[in-house]
Image (cartoon, rainbow, N blue to C red):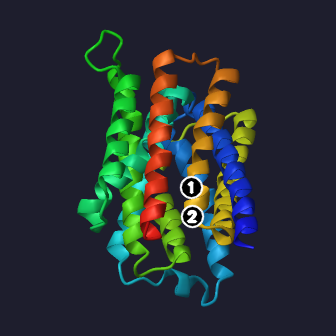
Amino acid sequence: MMEQSNRAGIVLMIATTFVFAMQDGISRHLAETYNTFMVVMIRYWFFAGFVVVLAMRQKGGLRGVAATSQPVLQALRGLMLAGEICVAVYGFTLLGLVESHAIFATYPLIIAALAGPVLKERAGWRRWLAILAGFVGMLIILRPGTAVFEPVAVIPLVSALMFALYGLMTRYAAHTDDAMTSFFWTGIMGALALTLVGLPSWEAMSSRDWGWMLALCVTGVLGHWLLIRCYAVAEASAVQPFSYFHLVFAALIGLTIFGEALQTNVVVGALVIVGAGVFALWRAHLAARGG
């Protein structure tokens, strides 16, 4: 039964990454024309509405879901993710989807590296070797010290670091709060913060681009719903490695829709990073089972 559930979870995870990749492509299209803060703000309004509707359907309603003994941590989580999305979308407009996602794929390795000092989780030498390999893969992509190095390539690395910190804070919050409470605070805090910075940056949008904005909002909500369903039916350790399909789908969109080039160093570096990430996840799974 668990094997069947994990298979369903894998299908849901792959579907989730496809939807999120479409969301990234639409975000890049809109942010190339309109202010990034405004684009992400409208997306978050829709997301916050979705979160509120979900919360109202839970036992205890809005008040029960919003209740937390760690409001500062939950608020910081929401702000971190909102900021990370803005950085990531801005990076798409400068670097494209292929290179941005290749570098962003380091975030599970950053989480593995920081989990020890932050969460007191022990990592063995094999996982540290995987983390080092992932760092080497990132250097292959960035090519520091060469004439082709672009300082803007650091932007997706900043995004990966922010997302890793968000992930660590989420895991810490899970010691006290359930997933729905964290999800609620993520949507509400992000919407509030982005409204403050997004409204002053408001720009008139064409009717066609409002259609794209609606598609962006729908893909955002659909992606989160699929992810919730995925973790509801399957073990996280079984489906997590398949989250790397996000890189594959985003790269395909970048290549086919936006005409991005596929650089050899990006391919090699991405393969190293993904391989190291999958190995680190596998070692973490074995450690959790006492292996």
* Disc 2 target residue: 236
Which quadrant of the structure image shows residue 54? bottom right
Query: What residue is at 36 percent from the left and 37 percent from the top?
Result: 133
Q: Number of labelled discs?
A: 2
- The residue most toward the bottom is 60
Residue corresponding to mark 1: 240
Circles 2 and 1: CB distance less than 8 Å? yes
Q: Picture quarter containing residue 254?
A: top right
Mark 1, other Cα within 10 Å: few <14 / some 14–19 / many ≥20: some
Position above or below: 277 against 72: above
- Side of 104 where 126 appears, left or right: left
Residue type, numbered disc 2: Ala
**Secondary structure of residue under mark 1:** helix
Whole-angstrom CA distance, mark 2 to mark 1, is 6 Å
Residue 23 vs residue 208: left or right? Answer: left
The front one of 191 and 22 is 22
On screen, residue 257 above or below 157: above
Residue 196 seen in this snapshot? no
Front residue of 142/190: it is 142
Label 2 element class: helix
**Which quadrant does the C terminus fall into?**
bottom left
